[in-house]
Amino acid sequence: MTRQKLKFITYPLSFFYGLIVELRNFLFDSGILSSQKFRIPIISVGNITVGGTGKTPHTELLLQTLSEEVKVAMLSRGYKRGTKGFYLANEQSNSQNIGDEPYQMFLKFPKVKIAVDNNRCHGIETLLKKEFGPDLNAIILDDAYQHRYVSPGINILLIDYNRPITKDKMLPYGNLREPAHNKDRANIVIVTKCPIDAKPIDYRIITKDLDLRPYQTLYFTTYEYKTLYPVFDNAEIEQLEIKDLTTKNPDILLFTGIASQNELADFLRANSNSLTSLQYEDHYKFTAIDLNTIAEKFENINSANKLLITTEKDAARLLSLPNIPEIIVKNLYCIPIKIKFLFEKEKDFKKQILDYVRKNTTNNLISKK
């Protein structure tokens, strides 16, 4: 099918899909469908476009910010998990029973309650039960911008710098889950994946295009790649500082199952002798054939100075797989991502989040503190 024919088919579908989404939002806005409020501070993180906008690293930033002062939980639907209903992460958890992103966060924040439930209202109610978290001070909802059955106290909308919502179209013609004007539901808007070399005028144009309301706060963030570490305990490699990549000038094989590897691939390409990349679909479940292919490609790189790299999200899935080729186990690095706020706004963002939780928490001890 030609691109023109595909456009002819998908554009009308986008129009009708947009009508359905707008009708749903109207039902919530008019009170015909109800959004439930809870007695605990709720922070929602999400987007209105398909594909990666950086939800997981931004959610991790929220967990890190809040867990230093209050007791916080993270609730996700656990996309592509093999279990149903409410599930609280524990020592027996893996990516198969709670999903790759929740498991990644559980590994990084073992003292934080990480839970999954397709029904967010039920999940929150369960977390607040005596046996789970009567002393919780806040709950973060992952990927919940469209989940309007819960009324969050702070709604955080993430927008990819490279895919402006004001210039996009509705699915399936474009990438929008709902029309761009629904950004107005957000209390905080974060433009993510900003390039370091962008000019001030670029940010002024984005700010003008977004045309935010007085009650909305706008931030810009970018990615920082941190120290590479071995994925498996029995690896034959040690941690590798980012600054050492350029010094070593290695030949890199990168494989990912994420929405987009473009930013990571560009970074590694600029800090290596050569880069070979394998890209699988988001949340991809690697098969034995895939792993053998990866192992063979890495083995065939004719260099004594070579690296095998994947993402934390992919590593979370690999940890639960059996019979991984030995060459992968011994050589696989994981490269973490950290969020960096532009224009020195990180303190402002953290203060906004903490002030909301302090003001609205039901725990009197924390309120006094």
Image: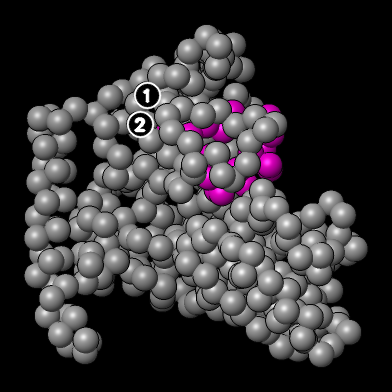
Between 328 and 208, the one lying in front of the other is 328
The residue lying toward the viewer, choosing from 21 and 350, is 21
Q: Position of residue 253 (x, y in %)?
A: 70, 78
Badge 1: residue crowd in 10 Å (few <14, some 14–19, many ≥20):
few
Q: Relative to residue 148, is residue 229 depicted above or below?
A: below
Location of residue 8 with respect to 369 vertically, above or below: below
Residue appearing at x 68%, y 72% in the figure: 292
Q: What's the amino acid at mark 2?
A: Asn
Residue 337: image quadrant is bottom right
Above or below, 193 relative to 266: above
Q: Which structural element holds mark 2?
A: loop
Q: Which residue is mark 1?
A: 122
Q: Position of residue 248 (x, y in %)?
A: 86, 81
Residue beneath the point at 84% across and 88% down? 303
| Residue type of the residue flagged with mark 1 | His
Residue 142, numbered label:
none
In the displayed structure, does residue 331 sit left or right of residue 176?
Answer: right
The stretch of residues the image draws in magenta is 98-117
26 part of magenta stretch:
no
What kind of element bears circle 1? helix
Q: Do we see residue 73 in this rendering?
A: no
Quadrant of the snapshot with the N terminus: bottom left
Write the residue at 49% across / 42% down.
82
- For label 2, the residue is 119
Q: Is residue 11 left or right of residue 271?
A: left
Q: Is residue 145 left or right of residue 243?
A: left
- Position of 98 with respect to 69 (left or right) is left
Q: Check if mark 2's residue and mark 1's residue have beta carbons within 8 Å.
A: yes
